Amino acid sequence: MDRRQISQLAHADHPIAAPLADDTVRRLLDRAVGTDAERVLDLGCGRAEWLQWLLALNPRVRAEGVDTDAGALALGRSGAEDLAVADRLALHEADAAAFTSPHPFDVVLSVGAAHAFGGLLPTLAAAREHLAPGGRVLIGDGFWEREPDTAALDGLGAAADEYDDLATTVDRVVADGWTPVYGHVSTLQEWDEYEWCWTGSLAQWALDHPDDPGSATAYRAAADHRAGWLNGYRHTLGFVTLVLRVSP
């Protein structure tokens, strides 16, 4: 069982792959899309959950998503069919960092996918390439709530310089030529819901499929993730989602 299969199972009960509650997702989409956006792109879309939500809420919008995970994209297409929005959704199996399009987009999303670009600022650089004049970017990434100790870094498999604190993170975004017009910092409740769903969904699948060749791997992954979270990065890793416009 590879990392992608584990991720799909772990997100069964929390399809939005970020520590964000449903009402938060709706609010962020509303702020990003507004009343005028018609064309939206998600770089690193996974199962295209953000786009499915968006299309269901906004019948005027057409959307495209890019990801390298064919299995996740197949789930996205199936979900779009179930919601009757598949005619307004195009999903591309491609490297999001190298993706090109013949037209610009009113909104570009990339939430929790900065690793695919090499960090937050490279993600924003990629988003800028696709953005129409006056458009908005919806981006989400981690930051340090407090100085990470060894347990937090070990639990995440991260380095101390992988993130900055919140103020420094926003300052870097602004210095890169962006103006935040809205933002949300994930609450502890949102984080706990996300992590309990991640570890619980995976563990439950392993318990329900004891004869599957991947069962032991899934069970161990759930246990290791839970330990890394509870004994390591809980209260240390934060997550911020920003709605941005290009600065004058």
Image: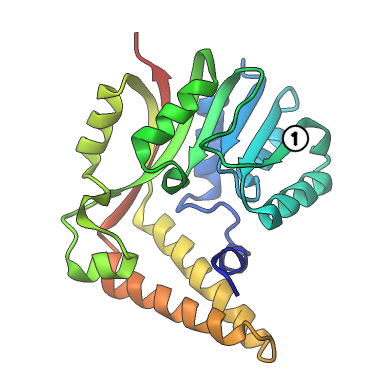
- Residue 12: name its quadrant: bottom right
Q: Position of residue 2 (x, y in %)?
A: 57, 70
Lateral position of residue 147 relative to residue 224, left or right:
left
Coloring scheme used:
rainbow
The residue at 50%/22% (across/down) is 129
Residue 242 appearing in the image = no
Question: Quadrant location of the N terminus?
Answer: bottom right
Residue 195: percent from left, percent from top: 45, 65
Depicted 41 relative to depicted 131: above or below: below
- Residue furthest to the bottom: 211
State the residue in front, 195 or 129: 129
Mark 1, residue position = 89
- Taking the image as shown, residue 7 lies to the left or right of residue 171, namely right
Answer whether residue 64 is visible to the viewer in this image.
yes
Residue 227, located in which quarter of the rendered image?
Answer: bottom left
The quarter of the rendered structure image containing the C terminus is top left
Q: Is residue 211 above or below residue 173?
A: below
Whether 189 is drawn above or below 24: the answer is below
Q: Residue at x 38, y 34 (%)?
A: 122
Closer to the camera in the image, 51 or 157: 157
User: Amino acid type of disc 1?
Assistant: Leu
Most foreground residue, 125 or 138: 125
**Crowd tier of the residue under label 1, counting other residues whose Cα lies within 10 Å: few below 14, some 14–19, many 20 or above:** many
